[in-house]
Amino acid sequence: MVMAVISVDNRYNATEMNELIAKCQLGEREAFDELITRYQRYIFNLIYQHLGSNVDIEDIAQEVFVRIFRFIKKYRGEASFESWVYKIVLNYCRSYARRRSMLNRLFFVPVERDDENRSIDIIDAQAGKENNPMKLIEHQRIANDILDELRKLPAIYKDVLIMREVNELSYEEISEILDISIGTVKSRISRARSMIRDKVKL
């Protein structure tokens, strides 16, 4: 699948585009649907170019559309609308890639760390400095196994682990979001790690 050409529907001239954007900024949903129809292929191509084909491009595009709708009132025309859209897509792709990369960081034997006594030995699944092909394959195998097991965890364990390890929230932040005690947060995180270690063959 090749999506190399970044194209925008060019049926509208500058004046028509400005009028369409102005209607979107007033909250007119039909105008926004028309705007998305115009930029959909452009956005799909950008996502593909930044994240590749191994992602659900349509789901990611939907998240981008939501962000465009949410922030379009802030567009002031200081840059082209295409550049403004590109920035939103790029920021989301970076955020998405970062979350995915952090999910691919592996945790095994508990070790002491400085940040709030988090006990987790982290190994980069990408193995950036590892040149041994067999070890790279093994890293990827373990990364995939961990991701599979993470998805299977009961929600009460999966949510806290993602909040902690992917989004890097503090125990206090997780406690506030889930409305549970810090002790319960720590207990669930510990249990989630143990459940994954028990399932993944290291």
Image (cartoon, rainbow, N blue to C red):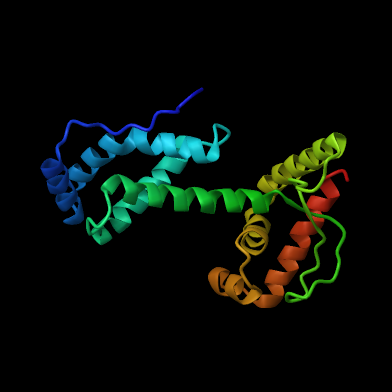
Residue 140 screen position, x and y as percent: 77, 39
Image point (12%, 47%), residue name: 19
The extreme front residue here reads 79
Q: Quadrant of residue 16?
A: top left
Image point (86%, 35%), residue name: 134
The extreme top residue here reads 1
Residue 182 screen position, x and y as percent: 67, 76
Report the number of discs: 0
Residue 69 screen position, x and y as percent: 30, 52
Which of 141/44 is in front?
44
Which of 186/163 is in front?
163
Q: Does residue 200 lie above or below 4 as drawn?
A: below
Which of 130/102 is in front?
130
Q: Does residue 169 lie above or below 55 as drawn?
A: below
Q: Quadrant of residue 138?
A: top right
Image point (23%, 45%), residue name: 32
Q: Is residue 115 left or right of residue 45?
A: right
Image point (25%, 31%), residue name: 9
Residue 170 screen position, x and y as percent: 63, 73
Which of 18/154 is in front?
18
Q: Does residue 75 lie above or below 186 as drawn?
A: above
